[in-house]
Amino acid sequence: MRLSRQDLRRRERGYTLAELVIVCTLLVTLAGVALPIGKLSHKRSKEADLRLYLRQMRNAIDEYKRFTDAGLIPVEFGSDGYPADLETLVEGVDIVGQIDTRIRFLRRVPVDPMTGDVEWGMRSYQDEWDSDSWGGGNVYDVYSQSEGVGLNGVEYNLW
């Protein structure tokens, strides 16, 4: 069977309008499903970074306190053995009885992934556990200054 010229032209025309509409509808539907999942995974990633950075800074503060309790670091009056600020953990302190020996507890102060800033909320040993203002005497705890709420329903500044 031989095809006529008209049948050949009909075959070479390409996709019909209905086929294009169906394909576009499917693509829009898939994009509509993928976008919220992408936003959720991005938020979950930022929350994981926040947990990690808070844990690192709190561990550094605890390690500093252990060193002061052991008498390896001189304790400033009124500090209760906690660092004066986060920069002290980065710059390091001299070890008692050793010349030119500094110990550093953090490589750098991490950026808060929720605010995009290096500024963290701090509490001193004399402050209340849920205080939003820093007494300035020492650094006992750190928290995010973000006003957002996590996927678990808890505000970031309470983590």
Image (cartoon, rainbow, N blue to C red):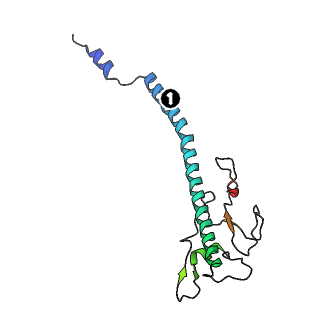
- The residue indicated by pointer 1 is 25
Residue at the spot x=70%, y=55% of the render? 147
Residue at the spot x=33%, y=18% of the render? 10
The single residue placed furthest to the front in the displayed view is 70
Q: For this view, does 156 lie left or right of residue 21?
A: right
Q: In this view, does 71 lie above or below 109?
A: below
Image x and y of residue 65, in percent: 64, 74
Is residue 139 something one can see in this rendering? yes
Q: In this view, does 156 lie above or below 13?
A: below
SS for dot 1:
helix
Crowd around label 1: few <14 · some 14–19 · many ≥20 (10 Å): few
What is the number of callouts on the image? Answer: 1
Q: For this view, does 64 lie left or right of residue 77?
A: left
**Which residue type carries mark 1?**
Thr
Q: Nearer the viewer, residue 49 or 101?
A: 101
Residue 96: image quadrant is bottom right
Image x and y of residue 102, in percent: 54, 82
Residue at the spot x=55%, y=76% of the render? 104
Image x and y of residue 81, in percent: 68, 77
Residue 94: image quadrant is bottom right
Where, quadrant-wise, is the C terminus in this rendering?
A: bottom right
Residue 111: image quadrant is bottom right
Is residue 111 something one can see in this rendering? no
Q: Which of 128 and 157 is in front in this view?
A: 128
Residue at the spot x=63%, y=59% of the render? 115
Where, quadrant-wise, is the N terminus in this rendering?
A: top left
The single residue placed furthest to the top in the displayed view is 1
